[in-house]
Image (cartoon, rainbow, N blue to C red):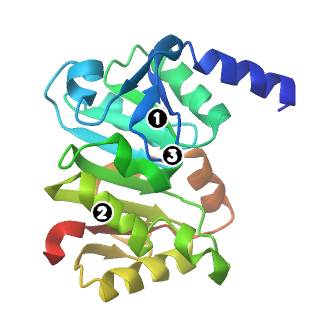
Amino acid sequence: MTRRNKLLKFTELLTFSNVYEGTEINSPILSGHNGILSPMNGQWLAKYFKNQNPITVELACGKGDYTIALAERYPDRNFIGVDVKGARIWKGSTVAQEKQLSNVAFLRCKIEFLAQYFDENEVSEIWITFPDPFLKESKYNRRMTSPSFIDSYKKILKPDGLIHVKTDSPEFYDHTREVLSELKIPLIDDFFDIYSEETLPHPDLDIKTYYEMKHLKIGRLIKFLRFNPNSDQ
């Protein structure tokens, strides 16, 4: 994609009614439709979805494959795809608008600052689908299941809220298991190869993203972990 095309998409994003962007660090203010600034923490249901249905957040959503598929499957739930890449958000938000999915929103921000855009107990579940594993040890704190991330998820999830992790990376899988063990958070589900099972361990694992299709073509095994980060309390 050329720089010009990216700039055009970034400009279009500002006009999309289903996209919000983080404006600054340590502030809950988001830029929404036509650049209107507004805090959304604690107000996603009232201001955007206009219902009382539970919220599911997909982190590192990319082009929104999982977010959109889940929204189509569960019209009585709300879904927010989160990613920092504007071009990816543009694709997902465009598809959601074409499909007229009113239960979908996208949030462009760094996931490190996720907790400032949601109130305590505002989110019912989180999906983490094929995140960058950040294999270098120096990148430990950037892995999306490192302790600092888990702590931020705990802040916004309901007490019984679940986190679902789907990855092709054995390193990220092992890292997540080690962190949860250190934090004394028990695993509800733990599968190293979901497609070797007689039935999928979760009904929504049949959704395949662009990246999963690429991983499967080269023989990568798909792993799945599920846990409640608040179960250590």
Amino acid type shown at disc 3: Ile
* Closer mark to the observer between disc 2 and disc 1: 1
Give the spatial CA distance, label 2 vs label 1: 33 Å
Q: Depth check: give the residue in front, 43 or 172.
A: 43
In the image, taking residue 169 as reference, residue 70 lies left or right, namely left
Give the spatial CA distance, label 2 vs label 3: 43 Å
Kindly indicate the quadrant of the structure image that contains residue 73. Answer: top left
Amino acid type shown at disc 2: Thr
Kindly indicate the quadrant of the structure image that contains residue 91. Answer: top right
Q: Residue 107 carries which label?
A: 1
Q: Which mark is residue 199?
A: 2
- Residue 56 is situated, as x and y percent measured from the top left of the image, at 29, 42
Q: Residue 47 carries which label?
A: none
Pick the quarter of the image with the N terminus.
top right
In the image, taking residue 213 as reference, residue 8 lies left or right, namely right
Which structural element holds mark 1? Answer: strand
* Label 3 crowd bin: few (<14), some (14–19), many (20+), radius 10 Å: few
* Label 2 crowd bin: few (<14), some (14–19), many (20+), radius 10 Å: few
Q: Which of marks 2 and 1 is nearer the N terminus?
A: 1
Amino acid type shown at disc 1: Leu
Q: Are marks 2 and 1 in contact (CB under 8 Å)?
A: no
* Vertical placement of residue 40 versus 129, above or below: above
* Closer mark to the observer between disc 3 and disc 1: 3
- Residue 209 is situated, as x and y percent measured from the top left of the image, at 53, 46
- Residue 134 is situated, as x and y percent measured from the top left of the image, at 63, 70
Q: Residue at x 44, y 62 (%)?
A: 166
Residue pointed to by mark 3: 25
Q: Do the residues labelled 3 and 1 touch (CB within 8 Å)?
A: no
